[in-house]
Structures are given as structure tokens and as C-alpha cells.
Amino acid sequence: MSDVDDCVDFLQRLIRTRSMPGREGDIAALVVAEMERLAYDEVWVDEAGNVVGFVRGAADAPSVMFNTHLDHVDAGDPDDWPHHPFSGDIDDGCVWGRGAVDIKGPLAAQVHAVAGLLAEGERPPGDVYVSAVVQEEVGGLGARYMADTLRPDLILVGEPSRNELRRGHRGRVELHAHARGRMAHASMTELGRNPLTVMGRFLAALVDVELPEDPELGRATLAPTLLRTDQSSANVIPGEVLLTLDCRTVPGQTAESLRERLLPLLREAEIEGTETEILVPEYPRVSYAGYEMTYAADNPAHALPADHPAIRTASQVLSAALGGEPPVDVWRFATDGGHFAEAGLTVVGFGPGDDRLAHTVSEHMPIAQLALGLRGNRALALEWPAGYAAAG
Ligand SMILES: [Zn+2]
């Protein structure tokens, strides 16, 4: 089997192994077995359930960690897919299924790229870690744990980037706006205090709210996404309303600074007899390995400048390996890279797959693109850390 065929076969097995957040045990075992088969020096599962493969460096170049995750988002109704989401079918040169792009294609490319070096008797000049973490799709339990326990000199986040370079992304903060009024029979409006009226006024005010702009990442944005009341009956004025806001933040913005910015607008939207508050929700999570962590819905933004040595040297390596200088951009969505960057680590993004297909029913990975990702990752493992040391 060729390198690429072997990687495709692994990708198919990954897609056929379902791995919703909190239920990554089976896929973790699959990745461990694959790393052992491919003769990594050491393979382990940490306390949180993250899988780590280790290859010892031949010299003292900086260490690098290749990083992806084990979980995927819900596939929805399989009938909405052109191919069953857990089939791993190959059609017209592409591997289909949930996770083909986000994140099992990039995961397969990272695991096999580093193994390909070993198979040819080559050894990277610095230590290499290949990690696949748990619960990226629900706020990053695995990465939050890992950022405290493993500190490589460089991190390559493999989220899909069409084999281009990514140097950061906006953060994501979730806010809950609450309005409490007075419940009443809907035929007696004068007895109620309708909190939906408050939310309506608040929603209208949000349209004009000015948010900061970052020279690297663009403007922060804010989207109301969920609206819930304490009622399921259509003939009752609800007593309470909860509005969820999805905020995409730029560096310098925190959940608390956003809350302070928006609370006066909500207070202004109050009507007589109502009360309001904005909270940052906290979610308790437990990993399949039994590790527990409670964290706020607050994933940080991060960005390296375009001329940062880690970006410049990665670009040089990829230019030579892929035959052309890769475009450098930022991701639209948040990744685990924000947790690593917040811990003071240097994070660059590169992975096969079209990021615009992530979380859709059209998720598929062209095998040609997987092959390029494999080649790019392999060159990065071999040349990037030493190049970075020389440039720094
Ligand atoms: Zn992902």
C-alpha cells in the first residue's frame, strides 16, 4: 500500500468510528493502535483522555506538537447526506463523511506524516508530539488540560485550511441575557409584565452596537442565536426569557468586558416591573476518561503577525514541499489554538480540507488534498523547528 492509500484507509476507519464529545473512547483506542502499529517511540493517553504519540528528536532542535481533536459535531439526519455520514465512502476521488474535513482528515494526515519519516529511517531534529484531544467542539476540555501539561516550542493546529497557513482567529464568548417579568393570562395583558418586550427592545438595540476592530483579525461580531422562555403554552405571558448571544471576539476583549458593554443596553430596554442580568454561562464537562472540568463559554482569540518567524519559516518549508508559496490567512472559526496561545505557546495552523465544508452535510476530503497535507506535514516535522530556531 502507498503512503497515501494507507492514510486514506486510516481516515475511513476514523470516520466509521463515531466520536461525539464525551464519547471518544473508541476512536482514542483506534488512534493509539495506529500510532503503535506505525512505530512511534511512545504512545500514551493522558488523564483527560487525550492521545499523544511521541517521536524523539535526533538533535536538539525545538520541539513541535502537531495537534487535532478526536470529536466531531452531530451529523444530523443521515438522509440529508449524499453519502451516509459514517460510511467513509470514496466517490470521485474524495472520502465522504462526518469529520472528513473537521477533523479526521487532518488527524490522519498528521499521524501518518510523522510515521512516514520513521518508515524511511529519517528522524526529525527535535522532539515531535502528535496529539488528538477530546471535546474540542464543546469548548476544549482536552486542550485546556494539555496547555497546562505539555509545553512544546511550536504547535501546529491541523484544523482544515485547504493546505494554506493560518495565523489565528477570533475568540468565541457566549453570553446569556436574562429578563424577568410577571407571568399572567395572555387575555389579561395589564396584569403581566412581558419579558419578551424587554428582549425585543434589547435585540433592536444590538443591531447598532459598535464592536472593536483588530488589525489582524477584523471586526468583532455578535449574533443572537437562541431565545427561550419559561413557557410552553401559547396563551400565557411568560415570566422569564433567556437570550443566548454568540460573540466573536478580538484580542483584548473578554467575556467580562463584553458583559459590561452590553448590560447598559439591556437595562435601558427594561419596562416597568422587569429585572435583567447578563451572565457568562459555565458548563461542567466530563471526558470519556472520567476527567471533570467546569469552564466558562469563553474561548480566546489569538493571532501571530504575518511576519512572525514561525509563520515565515513554515511558509518557506511548505513552499519547497508543495511547490508554491501558501497563502496566509486567518480562520473564521475558533479552534483549540486559542487555549495554547493563551498559555503562551506559539501556534500556527495548517491542514488539508476545505474549512467551508466543516459542520455541513457536504463534508468530504479530496484524496489529492489529503496527499498534499501529508507531504506538507512531513516537511514541517522535518524542517520547520530547525528553521524556526535559525530565524529566531
Ligand atoms: Zn475542528
Image (cartoon, rainbow, N blue to C red):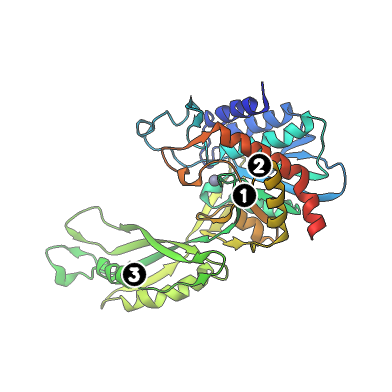
Q: Is residue 292 visible?
A: no
List x then y, in percent, for residue 134: 59, 44
List x then y, in percent, for residue 29: 64, 31
Residue at 82%, 34% in the rendered image: 122
Badges 1 and 3: C-beta atoms under 8 Å apart? no
* Left or right relative to 16: residue 374: right
- CA gap between label 1 and label 3 equals 37 Å
Q: Residues within 10 Å of mark 3 (few under 14, many from 20)?
A: few
Classify mark 2: helix, strand or loop.
helix
Residue 227 in which image quadrant: bottom left
- CA gap between label 1 and label 2 equals 8 Å
Q: Which residue has dot 1 on it?
A: 326
Badges 2 and 3: C-beta atoms under 8 Å apart? no
Classify mark 1: helix, strand or loop.
loop
Q: Is mark 2 within 8 Å of ligand 1?
A: no
Q: Residues within 10 Å of mark 1 (few under 14, many from 20)?
A: some
- Work out which quarter of the rendered image holds the N terminus and state it: top right
Residue at 39%, 38% in the rendered image: 76
* Left or right relative to 75: residue 381: right
List x then y, in percent, for residue 27: 59, 33
Q: Is mark 3 within 8 Å of ligand 1?
A: no
- CA gap between label 2 and label 3 equals 44 Å
Badges 1 and 2: C-beta atoms under 8 Å apart? yes
Q: Which residue has dot 2 on it?
A: 322
Q: Amino acid at mark 2?
A: Leu
Q: Residues within 10 Å of mark 2 (few under 14, many from 20)?
A: some
Residue 215 in which image quadrant: bottom right
Query: If you read the primary sequence from the N terminus, does the residue marked by circle 1 or circle 3 appear first?
Result: 3
Looking at the image, is 342 positioned above or below residue 30? below
Q: Which residue has dot 3 on it?
A: 207
Q: Amino acid at mark 1?
A: Pro
Residue, far left: 187
